[in-house]
Amino acid sequence: MEILAHFSPTPPPLSADLTHPVWQPVTRLPLAYNWRGEIAPNELHTQVRLVWTPEQLWLGFECSYTELDTDEQFEVEQERYALWERDVCEAFIRSPLEPRPDSYKEFEVAPTGQWCDLLIHRPRVDFDWQWQSGMQTAAEIDATHQNFRVVLAIPFSAFGLIPQAGDQWHGNLYRISRLNQARQFLAFAPTLTETPDFHLPEKFVPLIFVP
């Protein structure tokens, strides 16, 4: 199991419209399981595409839903701490420059476009939520078809290096949502914990920068 990011010399527009040509040839990665490794509900169909450019790592989530848990009042210009308490899409990424095997960066965006980023020194023990990655987000909710799309554009300056084709980092992709009023925790690579827990860097999988 691996996460593939495909190279594009030019970035897509900062938009939740994933029909732009840059996104079209990119591998669609399903979040097909919950954190325990059980098949995710069909109602929460989720897939992610990753693109890397000379300056940024782009992630595009496409998510079906039956109910949403979001803020009625929000400011996308300001960071929303504890975004994980409601519906959110997440990417945890560890670059080769991290000082510890359990250090990584956490990036989150809600269906509303609210965002949050954290520098994790040690999971749940030592983290910096005031750290700023410089990422940008876009989001769109299609209530008619009960799906939403979110996009994250993360500058490589947040990691302190620019990858080369073929390089391998590590990470995982997640989604928190609701179904029948119960919280659902989807993962690309299940963490296999007794209770929902995404902060398991030992469960990260290779993130490969495809030419």
Image: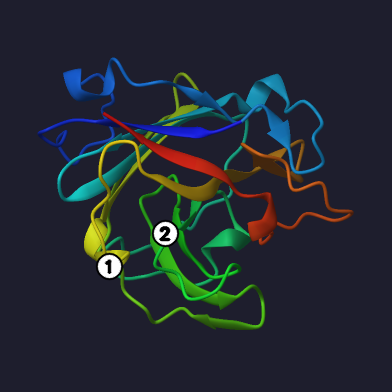
Q: Nearer the viewer, residue 18 or 158?
A: 158
Mark linked to residue 95: 2
Depicted 198 relative to depicted 29: above or below: below
Which residue is tagged 1?
160
**Which three-letter amino acid code belongs to the residue tagged 2?**
Ser
Quadrant of the frame with the C terminus: top left
Left or right, residue 105 beside residue 100: left
Q: Secondary structure at mark 2?
A: loop
Q: How is colour applied across the structure in the image?
A: rainbow
The residue lying at 57 percent from left, 49 percent from top is 87
The residue lying at 51 percent from left, 50 percent from top is 170
Asked if residue 139 shows in the view, the reply is: no
Residue 62 is drawn in which quadrant? top left
Q: Where is residue 116 drawn, in percent x and y?
A: 42, 65
Mark 1 neighbour class, 10 Å CA radius: few under 14, some 14 to 19, many 20 or more: few
**Which three-letter amino acid code belongs to the residue tagged 1?**
Gly
